[in-house]
Image (cartoon, grey):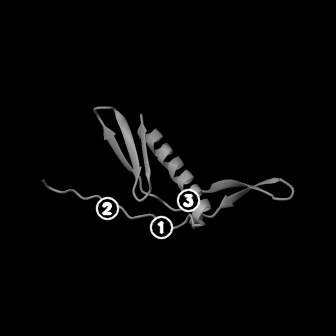
């Protein structure tokens, strides 16, 4: 999948569309949960302070994706961190109780 972005030239203000290399992106795992009682979906992003509630799975994923993007932009501008740092790894296990 090719991603596009718009580059704004500093001096002229001209816009140029360019493609971002796939290595510029990091995949984050999103945990989706459905609550049949409330008929809503909750999406959380392990390792990031992101929790969203939505009426559909698609909306929950969209909101989680937006939340990841906003979080990474804000933290990289405040701390000067690289947005391509590796996310935490998630392992889901079943425990018997």
Is residue 19 found left or right of 32 in the rendered image?
A: right
Is residue 89 found left or right of 5 in the rendered image?
A: left
Residue density around tag 3, few if under 14, some if 14–19, many if 20 or more, within 10 Å? few
- Residue drawn at x 41%, y 52% is 30
Which element carries disc 2, helix, strand or loop? loop
How far separated are the C-alphas under marks 2 and 1? Answer: 15 Å
Count of numbered labels shown in the rendering: 3
| Residue 27 pos. (x, y %) | 48, 60
N-terminal of the pair, mark 2 or mark 3, is 3
- Residue drawn at x 57%, y 67% is 82
| Residue 1 seen | no
> Which circle marks residue 75 in the picture?
3
Looking at the rendered image, the disc whose residue lies closer to the viewer, 2 or 3, is: 3
How far separated are the C-alphas under marks 1 and 3? Answer: 14 Å
In the rendered image, which residue does mark 2 sit on?
91
Which element carries disc 3, helix, strand or loop? helix
Is residue 21 found left or right of 36 in the rendered image?
A: right
| Residue 66 pos. (x, y %) | 53, 47
In the rendered image, which residue does mark 1 sit on?
86
| Residue 25 pos. (x, y %) | 56, 62
When asked about the image quadrant of residue 22, the answer is bottom right
Q: Residue furthest front?
A: 78
- Residue drawn at x 12%, y 53% is 97
- Residue drawn at x 52%, y 62% is 26
């Amino acid at each position: 999948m090719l991603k596009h972005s718009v580059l704004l030239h500093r001096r002229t203000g001209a816009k140029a569309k360019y493609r971002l290399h796939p290595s510029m992106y990091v995949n984050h795992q999103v945990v989706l949960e459905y609550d049949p009682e409330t008929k809503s979906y909750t999406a959380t992003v392990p390792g990031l302070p992101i929790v969203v509630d939505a009426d559909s799975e698609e909306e929950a994923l969209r909101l989680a994706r937006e939340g990841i993007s906003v979080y990474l932009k804000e933290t990289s501008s405040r701390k000067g961190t690289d947005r391509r740092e590796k996310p935490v790894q998630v392992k889901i296990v079943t425990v018997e109780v």
